[in-house]
């Protein structure tokens, strides 16, 4: 067939390669259907190209390369590039095409990068250059934020993926560039340095303007726009709405000037700095996310890049300004917070101030990231994935089977069947969790003991009487972690201190009240009084139960010879608290957390406080406001008919169920009403009604509480509006106003 003219194209309707010859009207086809092996595609393309087939698009403009990338056929793309080297750059540019599936692009580029070190470096350099171009477009303000942001992050994700899986990928940081080594691998990041430099300039410039804190900053917008060299052809900024109320005035610039309508008028000029923050915050945050991804892919697993930590510390004030003005940035771009406790601590107060609902959505979004989209407990399962448990020994049989199950599969979905029964589905799963939550606190297993009020549970320091107690604690942690992972509520409530242990929050002396109210009162008395001349003769050691025998236990090295004084009594109280609430049950806590963290990462659960964790695990109880009113006492000058009390109950009636739970937690330390209603609420010394005490009013004074006696100390507010505002602030600002009596 020498001398003939051929063309290589793709038949879109029959999904096969077509070889066209100018030999009469006949078409010859080599079948290579998408269901065949990948080497079939490669071999077909190889044959066609060897025979001189031309590379042509079909009638819809779709090229063979387009179809190969769409199908993830890396080997076939390799063949096409061998015959048409210009297609290499085309593939790199395809990473900007949002219509192509990202996983298919990864698959193709992964295959190409593994052919040789030089090919690997060439691909990474090309991706870095494309990412830099897209990043500068995003920072120029002349582009569509949404499209440009998605394009940048998509390219960077692909870049990082290829970097990690390249030939002879390093397992440590010695060849990864973050330590300054001038290796070939580190050089692929060089094009991105231009983008990181621009990012740094933006943040420094905004920080400078923030520090000036002038009312008249008329030149800030023009300075920023000129500084960043906006696209010369852009005549206006379109398709971009900044966050916050209203929209930013359209910014139109020529090459080197700002449109008059943007900066006209002193009233607009005075707000320019804040407006620029609104305009740029999301864009800069997306580039920060890209920077973090590139820093992270150069680090060994589990380590945070020192360079990125230094970057965040340098621009700490500007980043906090971004987050304060638009907290959603945390959820959208600041994923680094979840992976770096040092950085998380800088923003924790801002994160905790976000609505509980938003944090829940962020929690589950990250918890399930990377998992296949499925309806959790309803996903199809094989017979081997079903948890077959015995109803008459549900605790032990469940413990045995869960310990042997594949954690990754349990995270994706649960299927439970009781031995000898046919039922399956979500109802059976709910029943399984409900029964197990009751069994976990079954006294026969000696794992948990009831708190002083009888409604919550605390790990039993004497659980060692059960030889398998640590295995069972680990199992209990697995069950609660699984329940939280799958949004299944459990019928069990723990003491506030145990929720703190799960969250990694230090306990304090107030937590002792849940297990020993009288001892807690004694600790409070020590803190409230001068003990210098009382002759208590306390030392930093206490007598406690150790494996059934009373022993003197030092609170710190040499504690038996260290006297408690007025100066060190706070340390004594804290160490006593830690002994009673933590050290005495440390093995049990560790075993529980080992199981819990198999399904719930510590970095994610810290988004919540101890009250919110209880709501996540056990749900929101119903509260009868009429019963609440009926069983409330008034003291220190208040009576039921007083206007402040009437306003208070009107505010409570208007509250959401969540806010009522917060109020109950704020005053009593518990989110639950005991069996029998508010008449059976327990205090530090037995039954103790909910009580409201009068406090003299001063401006901005918040309500406080004494949880041991279920007392709300309510200032005598001059109006219902002020009362409502101050009360809600106290509830949503958390557990900082608590006192004990």
Image (cartoon, rainbow, N blue to C red):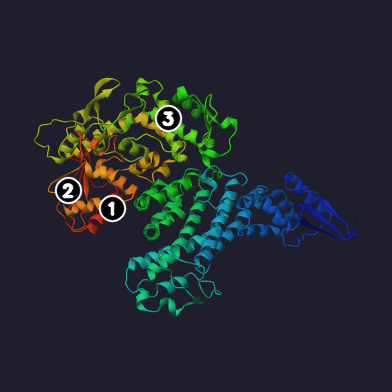
Please state, as top left, top right, bottom left or bottom right, where the N terminus lies in the image: bottom right
**Could you tell whether 489 is left or right of 143 in the image?**
left
Q: Please report the residue visible at 48 percent of the width from the left and 53 percent of the height from the top.
A: 292
Circle nearer the viewer, 3 or 1: 3
Q: Which residue is denoted by mark 2 in the rendering?
A: 640
Work out whether residue 594 can be spotted. no
User: Marks 2 and 3, Cα distance to the nearest angstrom?
Assistant: 43 Å
Figure check: 143 above or below 186: below
Is the residue under label 2 in contact with that under label 1 (CB below 8 Å)? no
Count residues near mark 1 (Cα–Cα under 10 Å), then give few for <14, some for 14-19, many for 20+. some
Is the residue under label 3 in contact with that under label 2 (CB below 8 Å)? no
Q: Secondary structure at mark 3?
A: helix
Count residues near mark 3 (Cα–Cα under 10 Å), then give few for <14, some for 14-19, many for 20+. some
Figure check: 453 above or below 273: above
Count residues near mark 2 (Cα–Cα under 10 Å), then give few for <14, some for 14-19, many for 20+. some
Looking at the image, tell me whether mark 3 or mark 1 is earlier in sequence order.
3
Looking at the image, tell me whether mark 1 or mark 2 is earlier in sequence order.
2
User: Marks 3 and 1, Cα distance to the nearest angstrom?
Assistant: 37 Å
Image spot of residue 243 (x, y percent)? 43, 63
Work out whether residue 426 can be spotted. yes
Q: Which residue is denoted by mark 3 in the rendering?
A: 435
Image spot of residue 487 (x, y percent)? 45, 41
Image spot of residue 639 (x, y percent)? 15, 48
Q: Which residue is denoted by mark 1 in the rendering?
A: 728
Res 60 label: none
Q: Relative to the observer, which residue lies in front, 330 or 134?
A: 330
**Could you tell whether 697 is left or right of 325 in the image?**
left
User: Marks 1 and 2, Cα distance to the nearest angstrom?
Assistant: 21 Å
Q: Please report the residue visible at 38 percent of the width from the left and 34 percent of the height from the top.
A: 491
Circle nearer the viewer, 1 or 2: 2
Q: Secondary structure at mark 1?
A: helix
Q: Relative to the observer, which residue lies in front, 205 or 94?
A: 94
């Amino acid at each position: 067939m020498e001398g003939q003219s051929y063309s290589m194209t793709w038949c879109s309707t029959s999904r096969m390669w077509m070889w066209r010859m100018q030999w009469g009207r006949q078409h010859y086809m080599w079948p290579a259907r998408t269901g065949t092996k990948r080497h079939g595609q490669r071999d077909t393309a190889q044959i066609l190209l060897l025979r001189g087939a031309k590379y042509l698009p079909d009638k819809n403009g779709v090229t063979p390369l387009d179809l190969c990338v769409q199908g993830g056929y890396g080997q076939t793309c390799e063949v096409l590039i061998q015959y048409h080297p210009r297609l290499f750059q085309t593939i790199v540019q395809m990473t900007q095409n949002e219509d192509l599936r990202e996983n298919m692009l990864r698959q193709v580029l992964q295959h190409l990068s593994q052919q040789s070190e030089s090919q690997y470096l060439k691909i990474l350099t090309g991706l870095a250059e494309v990412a830099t171009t897209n990043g500068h477009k995003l920072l120029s303000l002349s582009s569509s934020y949404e499209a440009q942001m998605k394009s940048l992050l998509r390219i960077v994700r692909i870049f990082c993926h290829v970097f990690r899986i390249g030939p002879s990928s390093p397992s440590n940081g010695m060849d990864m560039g973050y330590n300054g080594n001038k290796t070939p691998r580190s050089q692929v990041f060089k094009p991105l340095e231009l983008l990181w430099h621009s990012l740094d300039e933006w943040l420094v410039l905004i920080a400078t303007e923030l520090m000036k804190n002038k009312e008249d900053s008329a030149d800030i917008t023009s300075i920023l726009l000129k500084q960043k060299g906006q696209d010369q052809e852009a005549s206006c900024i379109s398709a971009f709405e900044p966050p916050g109320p209203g929209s930013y005035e359209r910014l139109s610039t020529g090459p080197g000037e700002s449109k008059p309508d943007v900066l006209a008028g002193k009233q607009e000029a005075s707000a320019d700095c804040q407006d620029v923050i609104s305009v740029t915050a999301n864009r800069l945050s997306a580039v920060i996310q890209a920077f973090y991804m590139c820093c992270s892919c150069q680090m060994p697993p589990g380590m945070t890049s020192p360079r990125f930590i230094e970057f965040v510390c340098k621009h700490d004030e500007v980043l906090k300004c971004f987050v304060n003005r638009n907290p959603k940035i945390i959820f959208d771009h600041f994923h680094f917070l979840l992976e770096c406790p040092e950085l998380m601590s800088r923003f924790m107060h801002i994160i905790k101030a976000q609505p509980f609902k938003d944090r829940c959505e962020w929690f589950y979004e990250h918890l399930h990231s990377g998992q296949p989209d499925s309806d959790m407990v309803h996903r199809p399962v094989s017979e081997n994935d079903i948890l077959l448990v015995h109803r008459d020994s549900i605790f032990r049989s469940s413990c045995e089977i869960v310990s042997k199950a594949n954690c990754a599969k349990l995270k994706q979905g649960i299927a439970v069947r009781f031995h000898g029964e046919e039922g399956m589905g979500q109802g059976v799963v709910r029943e399984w969790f409900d029964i197990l939550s009751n069994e976990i606190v079954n006294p026969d297993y000696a794992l948990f003991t009831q708190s002083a009020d009888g409604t919550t549970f605390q790990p039993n320091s004497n659980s060692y009487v059960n030889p398998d107690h640590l295995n069972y604690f680990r199992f209990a942690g697995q069950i609660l972690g699984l329940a939280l992972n799958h949004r299944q509520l459990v019928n069990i409530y723990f003491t506030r201190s145990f929720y703190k242990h799960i969250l990694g929050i230090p306990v304090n002396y107030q937590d002792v009240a849940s297990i020993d109210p009288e001892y807690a009162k004694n600790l409070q008395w020590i803190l409230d009084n001068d003990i210098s001349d009382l002759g208590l003769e306390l030392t930093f050691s206490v007598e406690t139960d150790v494996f059934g025998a009373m022993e003197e236990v030092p609170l710190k090295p040499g504690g038996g010879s260290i006297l408690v004084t007025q100066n060190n009594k706070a340390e004594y109280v804290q160490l006593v608290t830690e002994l009673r609430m933590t050290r005495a049950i440390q093995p049990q806590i560790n075993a529980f957390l080992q199981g819990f963290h198999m399904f719930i990462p510590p970095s994610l659960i810290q988004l919540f406080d101890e009250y919110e964790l209880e709501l996540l695990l056990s749900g929101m109880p119903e509260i009868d406001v009429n019963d609440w009113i009926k069983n409330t006492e008034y003291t220190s000058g208040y009576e039921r008919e007083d206007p402040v009390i009437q306003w208070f109950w009107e505010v409570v009636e208007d509250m959401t169920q969540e806010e009522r739970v917060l109020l109950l937690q704020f005053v009593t330390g518990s989110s639950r009403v005991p069996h029998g209603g508010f008449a059976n609420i327990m205090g530090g010394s037995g039954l103790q009604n909910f009580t409201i005490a009068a406090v003299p009013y001063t401006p901005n004074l918040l309500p406080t509480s004494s949880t041991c006696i279920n007392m709300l100390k309510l200032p005598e507010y001059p109006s219902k509006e002020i009362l409502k505002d101050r009360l809600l602030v106290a509830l949503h600002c958390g557990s900082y106003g608590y006192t004990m009596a």
